[in-house]
Amino acid sequence: MLQITCPHCGPRSEIEFRCGGESHIQRPGPPEDVSDAKWSEYLFFRKNPKGIHFERWLHRFGCGRWFNIARDTVSHEVVQEYPIDSLAPTITEKTR
Amino acid sequence: MSGYRLDKGGHIDRSKPLDFSFEGKKYSGFEGDTLASALMANGVSVVGRSFKYHRPRGILAAGFDEPNAIMQIEAGPHTIPNLKATGIELYDGLEANPVNAWPSLAFDALSINSWLSRFIPAAFYYKTFMWPDWHVFESTIRKAAGLGVSPKCPDPDGYEKHFAHCDVLVIGGGPAGLLAAQAASRSGARVIIVEHDPEWGGSLLTDPKQMDGEHSDAWIQKIVDELQEAPQTTVLNRTMAFGVYDHGLIGLCERVTDHLPISSRSGIRQRIWKVRAAQTIIASGAMERPFVFPNNDRPGIMLASAGETYARRYAAAPGRKVVVVTNNDYGHYCAQSLKKTGVEIAAIADARLQQNTSLPDQIDLNDYPVFFGTTVTNSSGRHRVRSAQLHEIDSAGKAILGRSRDIDCDTILMSGGWSPVVHLFSQAGGKLVFDAKVQAFIPTTCEQNIVCVGAATGEYSLTKNLSEAANVGVNAASKSGFECRAMAVPKITESEESSVRAMWQVDVSDIRSTGQKAWIDFQNDVTASDVKLAIRENFQSVEHVKRYTTLGMASDQGKTSNVNGIGVMESVLEKPMAQVGTTKFRPPYDPTTIGAFAGRRVGDNFGPLRALAAEQEHKEAGAKFDDYGGWSRPVCYLQGSESEDEAVQREAKAVRQGVGMFDASPLGKIEVFGPDAAKFLDRMYANTMSTLKAGQCRYGIMLDENGIVFDDGVLGCLKEDHFLVGTTSGKATAIAEQFEEWLQCEWTDLDVVTDNVTSAWSVINLNGPNARALLQKFDCTIDLSPNAFQHMQMREGRLAGVSCRIQRVSFSGELSYEVSVPWAYGASFWQALISEGEAFGVYPFGIEALMILRIEKGYLHVGSDTDGMTVPQDIGFGGILAKKKSDFVGRRSIMRPDAIRKDRRQFVGLETISGQTPLRVGAHIVSLGKVIPPIHTQGWVTSSVYSPNTAKPAALALVERGTERYGEEVQVWDLGKSRRARIVRPGVFDPEGRRLHV
């Protein structure tokens, strides 16, 4: 069970949150201009990296707000929390 | 000859004798005994039968590592299977039984397996019972090869869960753990220290020392007292750390009342702790390894450390004449301390050569015969070992032909070297390396804030371990931000350990006893030859060998067998230990009660149901309740002696004749406010909402992003920037959450606020020709006349002085008012309707009658008449979608080639051609003619009832090209029987909808 720091409420146990999966996925549109291939990529294809993963979480049993985290999928270390509307940060050895 | 109680010594209270029974026979022990030590003191040698061969087995170990003494304790609801006798604290009246012996331990009918053993090697079951089917054999095999039996009745015990946070968690209450905890606690840090044993002190309980001139018992007591007095420190004995998870989360299981006689237990039995620790110190000690030699499983053959623990801690001598076999110094220490208790040492066989071994001065080699360069190669005896066969070994470890001696004994103590208990460290993600000096896997680094101290590091000097523990305790506290001074470490005299000679398996290939089985995993009956067979069959990875042979898969999880198994693999694969590696350690470290994980979430508390405001009124009206999406709701209201079916039919009829009232409170109600509210709803719903005027309602259909129909409901416009979204009862929370996800994550430019007000309003639905007349009896500020308030409109106002919202929407096809009042008025509004309604023939009706009414009308129910493949075109929304220009959730997906296929299954009605019984839901639609499965299915029945208002069955279905086929006859096939039916438009009652608009 991870410990995640909600930007609004502070560190809390994973059981209070819901994971929304990979973040920063651009929803393509308008629909008539989107190819089947592009749409299927948006719906189904995910990076699933070994290492830093940018993902969004909902503090479901807390403030009810969505936010982003950068999490190392090997160590489960949460390297950074950042607002839902921010771009993905650059993670280097220094920022960790 | 066997074990016996020593006259003096031990941590037992001889003034408190306790009676217990084992296999029906009465015995007695003392307070402080475990079941295992009490059995040993009573001279019981055979405590179990082995898993596969049903060989008689005795106690091997004294702790978590015990593989043989597996017990079923107590009977009836309190029975617990598969406990280790070494972990059961003796209490008065304890009843214990072996788990794998029939009819008795002394005579086990299945011990014939032992004679057949050469025919049942590893994977025998996989290979033999393939034909015709494993299930033919399964029940017999499970009976033969099994452990205890689970209780047949509900668990009468209580459990609970507890969350805790600390700066430093110390796992293990031996000398290193205690000192580390003391160091950390003195800094003021929040410390939790846990010990699975009832007593503190670990190895000092067996081997007390003079520490700073005082007895170690006094030293232990001082530290425990200090920790207990420290207000921010929690001290937990009888508590096992069973798992280490992410981000410093440790699972603990506290045994609160297990050590008490059942009659004197009260309160909860066990408590699970979920501790979030900033720093964790693992002081879990080390476990000794047995020797792998032919017939090493005879009762009376045990670990040397276990022999010493029984004799010194429990005053239960393991036997009267002992042979010690060792490959390290400990065997000699053990023999000495046993001799002091009065046990005769017949001989020591040390695998090391004398010239390579520098034993400390206090070891006197003249007390008893000591044979160097010698090891044990066989044992004799039946229900107890009677002699040990010792052989000299050559430099490669091979027993030399002709150089043997047999020594009479009743006990063989084995010291095959020590393995640090690295399970928890490994679970945390810590890396292990094989250390050649101590011949064991030892912990190195870990990404988490977890360190090992004491014997768990592979260092066995108490002096060194204590000074390291003091440092580690100070460091852990200071990493959590607490300052503390360095600790003084008690002075102890001890000598340097010398080397260990690796002895993974005694090599008997030259002395013609290779046909004899040498056990590695005692509990799962895995022998060295099984491991070799697996490797011959090309299972090379340690994980594969484990699963093929079941090595290390028993309830002891290979605590005594893992490293020896890897050692045997090393010699066969000719790969060093480090490359063979270990299997992954996983939680739990030791079996943990499932009831403790469940805690209080059992029975009605497992998934508490939500209650309606008028629940009591429903009960009084005869309601039968059931769980509908987490709400406890009336199925129907029973009158007199009628059956449930009769009640449902009566209710469905009454609604269309007079007026029915239905508690619709769980219907999802989400308010959507803001200048962009209409734009937002246009994006969330497949149809257009922005054209709604204040006071109007519209049926809305919602898709998921895959284009699949997700929910439907009625949306009402209160003002141009304020909407009330109705959802189905089960989806209210999910949809409120989806609204927020889209607003917060995708459309951050929209100025919208949402609020799930589902449980703020109690909703009662009045249906039927008399609905208006009944409502008009109330003092209401809303004009209810047909022209002022039309179908699909909504109004806000006051009803009998209480604020209300009324929507003219209908799921029954009747004139219908959905009246919402604040939740607190739900019950009184219901009562008022019942008393006012008498004159209008009012009846309450439940969900099942509502289902009949909507099926009669052909109204779709999302989830019943749609499935995970239904797109809106399939249910008649193709035209509306074609007109909508703007994007919405799921839009692109319903333009996929598959979504616009011509032969999709479409929502239709089915009319039965013969018979009055309803079609079966799930029955398949097939073409006419003889049905020989497998056959192409054109679809299936999705909803089906007997319609009391048309006096015939009514059904809805999803059928291929259904809407092009109205009037066509099909076959409806179900479990080998077919019936004729005709595809029709959905809705058999009032298809013109006249009753809606009165």
Image (cartoon, coloured by chain):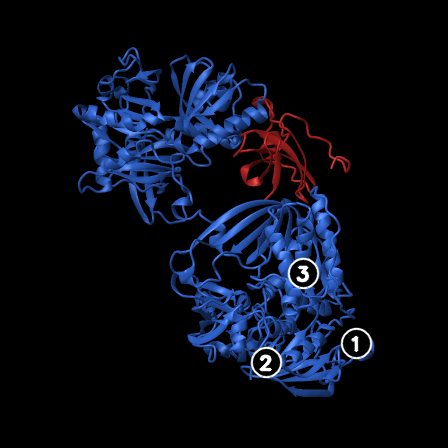
Chain colours: A red, B blue
Residue B356 seen from this side: yes
Q: Amino acid at mark 2?
A: Gly
Q: Residues within 10 Å of mark 2 (few under 14, many from 20)?
A: many
Name the residue: 67% across, 51% down: B429
**Residue A65 x/y as whole percent:** 56, 29
Q: CA distance from mark 2 to mark 3?
A: 29 Å
Secondary structure, mark 2, is: loop
User: Which quadrant holds the N terminus of chain B?
Assistant: bottom right
**Residue B439 x/y as whole percent:** 74, 66
Front-most of residues B859 and B192: B192
In the rendering, which numbered label is found on residue B319? 2
Q: Which residue is mark 3?
A: B175
Secondary structure, mark 3, is: helix
Letter of the chain that mark 3 sits on in the rendering: B
Outermost top residue: B788
**3 or 1: tag closer to the N-terminus:** 3
User: Disc 1 vs disc 2: which is toward the camera?
Assistant: 1
Q: Residues within 10 Å of mark 3 (few under 14, many from 20)?
A: many
**Residue B375 x/y as whole percent:** 71, 80
**1 or 2: tag closer to the N-terminus:** 2
In the rendering, which numbered label is found on residue B584? none
Secondary structure, mark 1, is: loop
